[in-house]
Amino acid sequence: MATTRGFGGKEFRCYIGTQDISAAPIGTAPSAAAHLAPTNGFEFRLNSINDIAWDAGYSISELSRTGARIKRSDDVIQHYGSGTWTWDFEYTVDNKSVLHNLLNLIYPSNTNGADHASGFILDANPTTDTMAHGSNGSLNTVATIFIKNPQSDESRMLHSAVLQNLTLQMDATTDSGVLKASGQFMSGYKPSVGTSSIFDSAVTTSTPTKGLFDLDNQTVGGDGASVKAFSLTINNPASRIGYQGASMEADGYVRGAEITSEGSITIKADENAMNHLDTWQDNTLDRTFAIALNDGGTTLDISIPEACMKGHNLDLADEGVFVELPFTVTSGANGGAVPLTLKTT
């Protein structure tokens, strides 16, 4: 029996770059480092690397025909190219520029990029992306993911990929409270398999973002709080639309559905926290509370001024009582508030 060498997971590397759609329009895989914004992209130093999910890229039907009790091979009809491909990631943030890219991809905005002095701002009236096939406008809305295989001709590139959801979380009991990011990318275009050099000069250095233990200013509902854990998920999904080309790949995307942001914050159940139960029980429209977490400056600052409480869950542990407050991010009464601001500098 002839065998060849096997591989270990640590031999694989992952890279990410936002596509500069003026050079690599939606539907076109970047072919040079200059087709990324910023140029060269970044090494995506993940907890572990997942492969692309290929199954949904196929359309498969199994026919049942008369005259036979066993299917023939031609009774299984398959078309590859008319579906979607997804890729999931978990990332302990070690480079703030990578985090900026992820934030800009979950909600692309011409005016409030995550690396801007004002930080990442989720607007009360979000813009609708133009994501037609071949689009090469000014708003970079998609990413390229490259999974580098030690057997280089089996490397994978997922291009024109939309970040469907992004979760940011910090927990005092996990990895020293460091900020973590996770999410899923989706593409309506076939991934390529083979060698590529566009990430050969990618940024590989670490520029760590602060975490929960750096946020010494913590208020919930206007009261001082002691935060044990914080989590926020932003959903801004796109759908592939239409069919084009020899393989009937996507004819672009539609990304005009509701943007939802939900999360939870777990705090020490002191007297202030106990009083938040009254907010949850309020049947008027005034059921919102403000969450403000920052380090006293602008290095890491999370502001949610109009979070709508959805629960008040006590954990009655002997070592200390905490309360989890699930919430939905809103724009407040009459849509007058900025739902979310996040600064990382």
Image: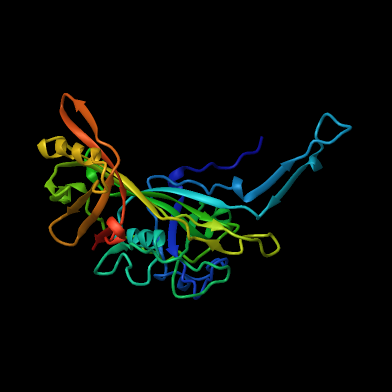
Q: Please name whichever residue, 197 or 170, is drawn nearer the observer in this view of the structure.
A: 170
Q: On the rendered structure, is 312 left or right of 50? A: left
Q: How many marks?
A: 0
Which residue is at the far top? Answer: 318
Quadrant including the C terminus: bottom left
Q: On the rendered structure, is 222 left or right of 51? A: left
Visible residue check, residue 206: no
Who's the residue at 14% across and 61% down the image?
A: 297
Who's the residue at 38% across and 58% down the image?
A: 102
Residue 145 percent coordinates (x, y):
48, 58
Who's the residue at 58% across and 52% down the image?
A: 84
Q: Give residue 139's quadrant in the image.
A: bottom left
Q: On the rendered structure, is 1 left or right of 152? A: right
Visible residue check, residue 74: yes
Quadrant including the N terminus: top right
Residue 226 percent coordinates (x, y):
14, 42
Q: Give residue 314's quadrant in the image.
A: top left
Q: Please name whichever residue, 283 or 122, is drawn nearer the observer in this view of the structure.
A: 283
Colouring: rainbow
Which residue is at the far right? Answer: 67
Residue 264 percent coordinates (x, y):
28, 43
Q: Please name whichever residue, 201 or 168, is drawn nearer the observer in this view of the structure.
A: 168
Residue 343 percent coordinates (x, y):
25, 61
Image height check: is 133 above or below 228? below
Who's the residue at 19% across and 26% down the image?
A: 317
